[in-house]
């Protein structure tokens, strides 16, 4: 399935410059563009940043400027079940989840694609910085954006062939600077909205700890802080309050600074170590999504990203039978964090990725 | 998406060309302030008072009883707040009775009078179509009742109320009776004497007149405290320099209702009934909301569909080129069921799936047939997306 001018296409709009320009470019190319914003759940009494009233207003204005219809579609219940509950559950398991991954897969694609079809559109588009390559075989590859600094393929590695077949990234070949310039030329709203990796639903200030405290008061149980030698150095106030590699706020002192090395959710223990004691070079990922739809047969070399903001590191990936993969990095990283995604690249191609597991770290 | 068919005449109507022609010259030529003493003021005042006389005549009222406002909502506000507060001051009356399915302009105003001015707010019993039951009104009225307000016809579900009968009951008890007639008067010529109402709201944009202008009929002798204070315009009941072109446009538009209502209704009824019959026949899990054909606005159809997201259906229809509305129509996409449907006892699995299709004098049989041709598929697609 290849999108062609004249086709109807639903564009997820945020009111920001990226999705506004995406919609404008598609309109220029002759698509029948429908702008859509999803109404997402947020902590009661607070606004979800992705669909706050000012964002709706801005998106509506841009749509009006472009002469395209714009609809707000309610996705509160689906978002809560698909994103917020698993977010809370992951913290209960001692992980540090990345809710944007589930949101992309289940809400911004699966949910929106279903609504788009009802609106008569086979395709959806977003203002993501990523690129698609449609191979002669029919397979669609996900590629990193030209603008390596803005590249968002890390967040998109959860998408399937079915998703990508019906997806268009109009900003694929543009840098952020070009996007700003083109938007200015078209007199589009130049509003900058924070990138999607922030927690949009935890309320003002974005303090996820406060949110968790309200969501599950029983989650934050204090327990021992222990070093490599097994000595108890102090007490933590709930594992969810800490992330791997964290240095500040531990309330303990040693001959050099301590960092969070590992969490043991079963025994409620927070392990810390000195900087040279930190780090791992191997781990296991589960729930791996292979974008091609097929897991590679054998071990392969790849560039591996363990956080959105971190640089990719070379290593070997060994796919397992059960949709997990073993990853061996060529170097030690200090902040490999269970719950975050490890994403595999070969050159500019994103092959897929999975969630880093607690076990084996 | 190039051709859009408008099926939302209960929300608003396009201005009739003849009304535009009436208003057009006035914007430039009659800019004077009707309150001014000089030539320019007097010319504007002449048109203003001609419009008032014309509207009064068509409503069976005296010109002194016509108060121009900015819209139907303002008329409702003035009627409720003005009469309730005046009656409270005069005789300590401190209870208000309204139907439970009134337009928000009445409902919210009455609620504010209750929460901020010490009135007791009671709701008159209605049947399952939202029609007030005159036989049971006595239950709600007492010697403290300051005002009764019942709409002529419901905007969401099209049900017409027995206004004359309700007015008669209020008259017997000397209780002022207000009727929000925005939807009703847009189709059915009325006479305030025959109806026996004391206060009646109209809004021009519901009958092919301009937005931004309405009127409140106030029977002589009805206590009314001004809500908007300032100058002595409109018999001291509504301070503001009158917008003469819009008022003249409203008078012209209402004159056309008088002259053309019979042929408009003759045009609308078969189209309305075609939609009602085809929808109920062809769409599984569908119900008509509001009254049947006898007690229903001639241009109005409204439905609920089981297990369907009404907001999405409106979006799907819009993307197919048909502009309709839903009881819970809401640009923000918040899936709250309409309070009217909830009040009338519809469960959530029905009330979230509401659709209102309202027709106008410009609606053709071809428009309706095209709509009916796509509706089943739109409903199926919307249900599949849930």
Image: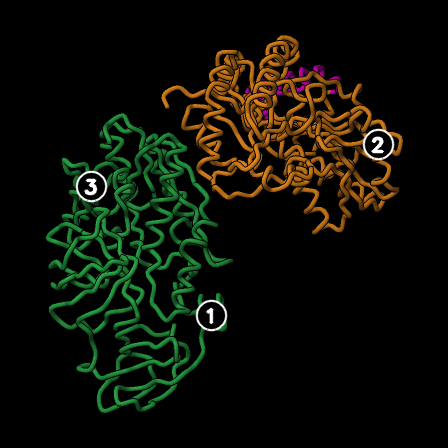
The reply to whether callout 1 and callout 2 are in contact (CB within 8 Å) is: no
In the displayed structure image, the side of residue B163 where residue A2 appears, left or right? left
Q: Judge depth for marks 3 and 2 and give the one in front.
A: 3
Image depth: mark 3 or mark 1 in front: 3
Q: Label 3: which residue?
A: A140
Q: Can residue B267 be seen in this snapshot?
A: yes
Question: Does residue B30 lie above or below B354 as drawn?
Answer: above
Give the extent of the magenta segment. Answer: B33-62
- CA gap, disc 3 and disc 2: 73 Å
- Distance CA(mark 3)–CA(mark 1): 42 Å
Circle 1 residues within 10 Å: few <14, some 14–19, many ≥20? some
Do the residues marked 1 and 2 share a common chain?
no
Marks 3 and 2 in Cβ contact (< 8 Å)? no
**Callout 3: chain:** A
**In this rendering, does residue B47 appear at all?**
no
Taking B178 as reference, is B267 left or right? left
The tint of chain A in the picture is: green
Marks 3 and 2 belong to one chain? no
Relative to residue B247, is residue A272 depicted above or below? below
- Chain to which the residue tagged by mark 1 belongs: A
Relative to A255, residue A75 above or below = above
Residue occupying the far front of the picture: A321
- Front tag of 1 and 2: 1
**Which residue in the structure is indicated by mark 1?**
A213
Which quadrant does the N terminus of chain A fall into? top left
- Which residue sits at x=56%, y=39%? B352
Q: For residue A194, which quarter of the picture?
A: bottom left
Residue B195 vs residue A287, the one in the foreground: A287
Q: Residue beneath label 2, please?
A: B170
């Amino acid at each position: 399935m290849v999108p062609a001018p004249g086709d109807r296409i639903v564009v997820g709009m945020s009111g920001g410059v990226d999705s506004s320009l995406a919609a404008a470019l598609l309109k220029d190319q002759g698509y029948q563009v429908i702008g859509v914003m999803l109404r997402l759940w947020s902590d009661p009494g607070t606004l979800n940043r992705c669909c706050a009233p000012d964002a709706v207003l801005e998106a509506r204005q841009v749509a009006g400027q472009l002469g395209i219809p714009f609809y707000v579609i309610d996705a509160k219940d689906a978002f809560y079940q698909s994103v917020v509950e698993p977010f809370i559950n992951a913290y209960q398991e001692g992980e540090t989840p990345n809710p944007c991954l589930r949101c992309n897969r289940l809400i911004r694609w699966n949910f929106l694609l279903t609504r788009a079809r009802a609106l008569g559109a086979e395709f959806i588009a977003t203002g993501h910085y990523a690129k698609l390559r449609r191979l002669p075989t029919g397979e669609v590859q996900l590629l990193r954006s030209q603008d390596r600094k803005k590249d968002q393929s890390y967040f998109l590695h959860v998408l399937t062939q079915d998703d990508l077949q019906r997806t268009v990234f109009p900003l694929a070949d543009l840098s952020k600077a070009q996007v700003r310039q083109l938007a200015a030329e078209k007199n589009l709203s130049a509003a900058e909205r924070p990138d999607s990796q922030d927690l949009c639903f935890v309320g003002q200030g974005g303090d996820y700890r406060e949110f968790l405290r309200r969501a599950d008061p029983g989650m934050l149980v204090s327990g021992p802080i222990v070093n490599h030698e097994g000595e108890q150095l102090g007490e933590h106030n709930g594992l969810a309050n800490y992330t791997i590699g964290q240095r500040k706020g531990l309330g303990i002192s040693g001959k050099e600074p301590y960092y969070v090395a590992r969490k043991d959710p079963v025994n409620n223990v927070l392990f810390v170590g000195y900087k040279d004691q930190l780090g791992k070079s191997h781990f296991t990922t589960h729930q791996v999504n292979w974008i091609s739809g097929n897991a590679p047969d054998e071990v392969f070399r790849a560039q591996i990203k363990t956080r959105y903001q971190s640089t990719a590191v070379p290593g070997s990936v060994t796919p397992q039978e059960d949709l997990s993969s073993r990853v061996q990095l060529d170097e030690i990283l200090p902040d490999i964090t269970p719950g975050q995604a490890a994403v595999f690249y070969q050159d500019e191609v994103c092959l897929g990725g999975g969630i880093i597991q607690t076990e084996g770290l | 998406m190039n051709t859009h068919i408008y099926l939302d005449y209960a929300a608003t109507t396009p201005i009739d060309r003849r009304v535009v022609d009436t208003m057009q010259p006035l914007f430039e030529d009659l800019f004077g302030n009707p309150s001014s003493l000089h030539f320019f003021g007097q010319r504007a005042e002449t048109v203003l008072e001609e419009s008032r006389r014309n509207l009064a005549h068509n409503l069976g009222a005296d010109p002194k009883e016509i108060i121009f406002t900015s819209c139907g909502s303002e008329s409702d506000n003035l009627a409720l707040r003005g009469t309730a507060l005046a009656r409270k001051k005069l005789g300590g009356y401190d209870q208000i009775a309204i139907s439970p399915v009134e337009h928000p302009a009445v409902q919210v105003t009455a609620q504010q009078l209750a929460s901020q001015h010490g009135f007791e707010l009671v709701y008159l019993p209605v049947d399952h179509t939202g029609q007030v039951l005159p036989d049971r009104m006595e239950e709600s009225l007492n010697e403290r009742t300051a005002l009764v307000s019942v709409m002529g016809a419901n905007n969401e579900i099209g049900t017409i109320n027995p206004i004359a009968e309700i007015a008669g009951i209020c008259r017997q008890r000397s209780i002022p009776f207000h009727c929000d007639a925005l939807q009703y008067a847009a189709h059915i010529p009325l006479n305030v004497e025959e109806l026996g109402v004391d206060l009646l709201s109209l809004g021009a944009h519901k009958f092919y007149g301009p937005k931004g202008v309405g009127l409140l009929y106030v029977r002589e002798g009805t206590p009314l405290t001004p809500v908007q204070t300032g100058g002595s315009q409109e018999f001291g009941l509504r301070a503001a320099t009158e917008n003469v072109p819009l008022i003249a446009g409203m008078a012209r538009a209402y004159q056309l209702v008088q002259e053309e209502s019979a042929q408009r209704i003759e045009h609308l009824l078969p189209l309305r009934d075609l939609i009602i019959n085809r929808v109920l026949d062809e769409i599984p899990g569908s119900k008509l909301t509001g009254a049947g054909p006898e007690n229903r606005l001639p241009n109005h159809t409204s439905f609920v569909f089981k297990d369907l997201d009404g907001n999405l259906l409106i979006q799907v229809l819009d993307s197919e080129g048909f502009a309709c509305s839903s009881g819970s129509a809401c640009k923000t996409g918040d899936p709250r069921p309409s309070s009217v449907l909830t009040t009338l006892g519809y469960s959530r699995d029905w009330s979230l799936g509401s659709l209102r299709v309202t027709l106008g004098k410009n609606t053709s049989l071809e428009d309706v047939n095209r709509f009916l041709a796509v509706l089943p598929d739109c409903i199926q697609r919307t249900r599949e997306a849930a």
